[in-house]
Image: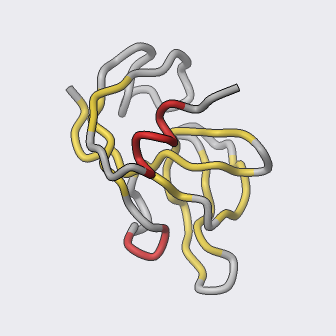
Amino acid sequence: MRNYKLERLQNGETFITSEKGSSMVPLIKSGQDHKLAPVKWEDVEVGDIVYCKVKGNFYTHIVKGKNDEKGCLIGNNKVGINGWTKSVFGLVIEVL
């Protein structure tokens, strides 16, 4: 299965997208458009919302922590934690 968001980010594109789900409410509502720009994990900060891959799944979630060895700790806007990853591909630069 192709991941068009991943492909576009890896090609250096900035674009508008949306996702279904309530894990990021009220920061991003289900189906709400947001703008993604390419980014490397080293350039994000705690509190940034990123498009990333954790344990085989892709998420648009918050960077909850950062560690030079482990990468970024990813979680939702509730209490959920997905885990550590260096597979960070996009940064939410605007919620529309």
Image vertical order of residue 12 relative to residue 22, above or below: below
Q: Position of residue 27 (x, y in %)?
A: 36, 33
Q: Position of residue 32 (x, y in %)?
A: 34, 18
Residue at position x 37%, y 28% from top?
28
Residue at position x 79%, y 50% from top?
55
**Which quarter of the figure is the N terminus placed in?**
top right
Residue toward you, 26 or 2 = 2
Residue farthest toward the right in the current orientation of the protein: 55
Residue farthest toward the bottom in the current orientation of the protein: 68
Image vertical order of residue 80 relative to residue 48, above or below: above
What colour-coding does the image apply? secondary structure
For residue 83, what is the image quadrant?
bottom right
**Which quarter of the figure is the C terminus placed in?**
top left
**Count of numbered circles on the image:** 0
Image vertical order of residue 5 relative to residue 64, above or below: above
Q: Position of residue 35 (x, y in %)?
A: 27, 36
For residue 17, what is the image quadrant?
top left
- The reply, left or right, for residue 7 in relation to residue 14 is right
Residue at position x 50%, y 58% from top?
63
- The reply, left or right, for residue 38 in relation to residue 63 is left
Residue toward you, 32 or 88 = 88
